[in-house]
Amino acid sequence: MHRPAGLPKVRGVSTSSVPRPEPAAPSGPRRRPALARITRRPDPDGALPALALFAAVRLAGVLAVVLTNAHRGHPLVRNLAHSWDSRWYLHIATHGYGRLIWISPDGAVQTDWAFFPLYPGLIRALTALLPLTAGQAALLLAWAAAGAAAYGVYAVGHHLHGRGVATALVALWAVLPHAVELTIAYTESLFAALAAWSLYCVLRGRWLWAGSLAALAGLARPSGFAVAVAVALAAAHEALRRRGRVPAALWAGAVLAPLGWLGYVLWVGSRTDDLLGGYLKVQSAWDSRFDFGAGSLRFVKALLLHGGGFVYPAALVIVSAGVLLFALLCLERAPLALVVFAGVLVLLVIGASGSFSSKPRFLLPAFPLLIPMARALARTWRLRRARAVLVYAALTAVSLLFGAYVTAVVHSPL
């Protein structure tokens, strides 16, 4: 046997038993094991500063709307509960479906079946339990759901990247230009809460909860099927990764996820005597259909040729930023469920027709788009705190001013 070079000859001891020096530890920060990321919990104590910041910013947004109304001589809070779609939700909550129609200027018959039932159903239940008007109940539900949504956003961010990024994620979500619509009588805050917690349950492997919350999200908004698609594809990916050896709860969650959305669509179809196509006809009367982006292209062309009010160029900038942020989300290889959920919402915004001024609102629940920005803001906070404060103050000012403008000044659809 040949003795390895550099080892001394020791009588009676095989050179193969001589201990070798341990390799040097690699320089630089150690990567966090994947298991630690998977098992990380929402950290309720650490969430309190993020939730307090969210509440402060959004209450400031409500105050900005109230002050703008006061300056213009309008009722102080009426447009928070009675703007555009809010009136339809309140009418459904009070009188039920099939009681309200509207004839559009082009002769289309628009019915209340276009509006999904979870939010008006909760309004009706709350007014039955408490001495509240429908408008008051609608606002109370929207504000409570906004807080639950912010905590869900924090939980997802904390699970993936820890407390700093989670706090930055909630902070950025609070100051989106159109975030005022989280605190008016609309369904965005309720949908966002259900979506965020469903996606968090996917990340934690709690498939029954994920599917149940996705089913409720499907009863909240037409775009609720985005959550169902995310849950189903994440479940399929997990089944392939485990070569089919998965718990029954995974399949149950995947089956539950689309039932809310599918159930309401089929119910509308039964009421219109067209089981499969009835809901699409109802939405078409509202000029809401998937036309593969033809309507969006016509809008951009008209805007470039003829111009438009401030709201429409701003909406185009916000939607374009959403597309860019989705590309960044994909580049950083975010979890599949988050990418699918955000991607479906972006696709619907670009590919569907309808008023372009409303499209930023449809992106509000797509909080995963903000993850790349949240990571950058968290790094800036650690290294250049004064700069991070300045950037965030500017974003907050834009959000408050823009929110008050679109809610209390202009008359474009929200």
Image: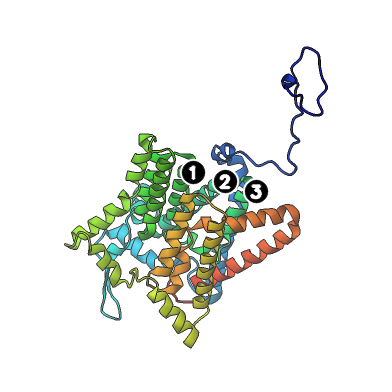
Give the quarter of the figure containing the C terminus: bottom left
The spot of residue 289 in percent (x, y) is 33, 69
Q: Residues within 10 Å of mark 2 (few under 14, many from 20)?
A: many
Tell me which numbered mark, 1 or 2, is placed earlier along the sequence. Answer: 2
Residue 256 vertical placement versus 2 (above, below): below
Instruction: Depth check: give the residue in front, 206 or 263.
Output: 206
* Residue 185 seen in the figure: no
Residue pointed to by mark 3: 164
CA–CA distance between discs 1 and 3? 19 Å
Q: In the image, which is nearer the foreground, mark 1 or mark 3?
A: 1
Q: Is residue 122 toward the left or the right of residue 148 in the image?
A: left
Instruction: Depth check: give the residue in front, 58 or 356.
Output: 356
Residue 354 in which image quadrant: bottom left
CA–CA distance between discs 2 and 3? 11 Å
Q: Is residue 37 toward the left or the right of residue 337 in the image?
A: right
Secondary structure type for disc 1: helix
Residue pushed farthest front?
1
User: Could you tell me if the residues under marks 1 and 2 are in contact, i.e. CB atoms within 8 Å?
Assistant: yes
Q: Amino acid at mark 2?
A: Leu
Secondary structure type for disc 3: helix
- Tell me what residue is drawn at x 48 percent, y 87 percent: 305
Secondary structure type for disc 2: helix
Instruction: Depth check: give the residue in front, 337 or 406.
Output: 337
- Tell me what residue is drawn at x 57 percent, y 48 percent: 157
Q: Amino acid at mark 1?
A: Leu
The spot of residue 149 in percent (x, y) is 49, 51
Residue pointed to by mark 2: 160
Residue 237 in which image quadrant: top left
Residue pointed to by mark 1: 203
Q: Residues within 10 Å of mark 1 (few under 14, many from 20)?
A: many
- Tell me what residue is drawn at x 76 percent, y 35 percent: 24
